Image (cartoon, rainbow, N blue to C red):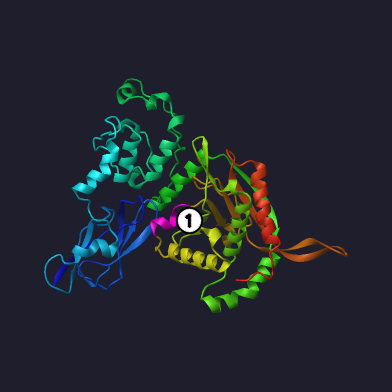
Amino acid sequence: MAEYKLLLPSMGEGVMEATVITWLFNEGDTVKEDDSVVEIATDKVDSDVPTPVSGKIVKILKQKDEVAKVGEAIAILEIEGEGQNTGSENIAAETSAPAAPDAETLKTIEEPLKTTAASATEYSGELYLSPLVKSIAQQENISESELKTIKGSGLEGRITKEDILSYVSNRGNQPQASQQPAAVQQSAPAPQAAAITATPVQVATGDEIIPMDRMRKIIAENMVKAKQIAPHVTSFIETDVTNVVKWRAKHKDIFEKREGEKLTFMPIFVKAIVKAIQDYPMINVSVNGENIIKKKNINIGMATALPDGNLIVPVIKNADQLSLSGLAKAINDLAYRARNKKLRPEDTQGATYTISNVGSFGNLMGTPIIPQPQVAILAIGAIVKKPAVLETKDGDVIAIRQLMFMSHSYDHRVVDGSLGGMFLKHVHDYLQNWDMNTEI
């Protein structure tokens, strides 16, 4: 028999570690190739780690709530074969975990950071910094005292790539003292804004105290940050989606039989959003300090409710390049993997615009919060049969129609009411005038 070291696999750009949530097997249990053996959490997404080999778990090296780095052994398996550690020799290739860099590689990585003595900032080790975050901080000549002022959104408050890049982009707006040498900062620290604290809650007899889980903490922090950064404005419109409902009813069974996939309303909504973005590309932007970054790609985030009540936003990459059939497949795949903890960290990154289907909960409308660093989000309400006035060649008539509210929240720093309203009207027009001859 041989020992096989199960390593924490690579989980996408900028993700250097993960926390063990729970082991799905115990020491002594036998596992088969591709069995999910442990659930892990990063600051982006929760997921499972499968084993690339069959064998028996003889030792669990990382217990629940412990942090493991990418490429670090989390368990030892006993597998068929001879010798010691034979499985770990090729683990990097099997799990996509990066091998530890050798001296020459480290030299190559570090060399660009030493262009000047001033830029090669050293840190005491008091703060935990991933190699990526540390390299960015060194390149931008960010002192350790500055780093301590950055509120990290990662595990245990650690600074992520997004945190450091956000700080760099807004650095010019910081008080002047923050850009002075560390010695000057210590003698004359920059004034800090008074922290806003919530009113303490009185706990009465019989009240239940439920600690937030890790994901709920991240959601809460991101929502507060989003409202603090962007001044929200919301526009509303009611849309007649009778043609959409009839078209879907006509095609859903044929599509499922042909593709083995459900045909929901979501790909139709996404298609309308993509067309409206192409008409109004300044909705597909982000704010970077005093600059507006106009995004080339159209990546649509799709707010998805999880079985545990939390929320995650997987991303449909390059949605403008997908047909209706392609959108349906991508949406179904992301929704399934989100609800079954199969998403990869990169599946939740890079969104440029987001849609939230509040109608799936029976709600008529909502006022969604804009996910940073996007500048707009659309909420889709429930489709309801209502009497409506229709204009015909013979005059106005009252008919039963399928109506739906849409609400569009946008960042008033860069999206004015005219742009936000016209964008929403174009989504409305595409849906209300849906072509019944559309092919899928």
Residue 331 lies, with reference to residue 204, above or below; the image says below
Q: Is residue 96 left or right of residue 4?
A: right
Query: Does residue 266 appear anywhere in the picture?
Result: yes
| Residue depicted at x 58% and y 57% | 358
Task: Name the quarter where the N terminus is drawn.
Answer: bottom left
Q: Nearer the viewer, residue 20 or 188?
A: 188
- Magenta-span inclusion, residue 215: no
Q: Nearer the viewer, residue 196 or 193?
A: 193
The mark total stands at 1
- Name, please, the residue furthest toward the right: 394
Query: Does residue 213 appear anywhere in the picture?
Result: no
| Residue depicted at x 44% and y 41% | 202
Can you identify the residue that label 1 sits on?
A: 313
Q: Position of residue 299 (x, y in %)?
A: 51, 55
Task: Name the quarter where the C terminus is drawn.
Answer: bottom right
Q: Position of residue 397 (x, y in %)?
A: 83, 64
Q: Nearer the viewer, residue 250 or 154?
A: 250
Q: Position of residue 399 (x, y in %)?
A: 79, 66
Mark 1 neighbour class, 10 Å CA radius: few under 14, some 14 to 19, many 20 or more: many
Residue 296 lies, with reference to residue 438, above or below; the image says above
- Magenta-span inclusion, residue 349: yes
Q: Is residue 297 left or right of residue 244?
A: left
Q: Image quadrant of residue 88?
A: bottom left
The residue tagged with tag 1: helix, strand or loop? loop
Residue type, numbered disc 1? Val
Q: Is residue 230 left or right of residue 119?
A: right
Q: For the magenta stretch, what is the residue range?
A: 344-350
Q: Image quadrant of residue 168?
A: top left
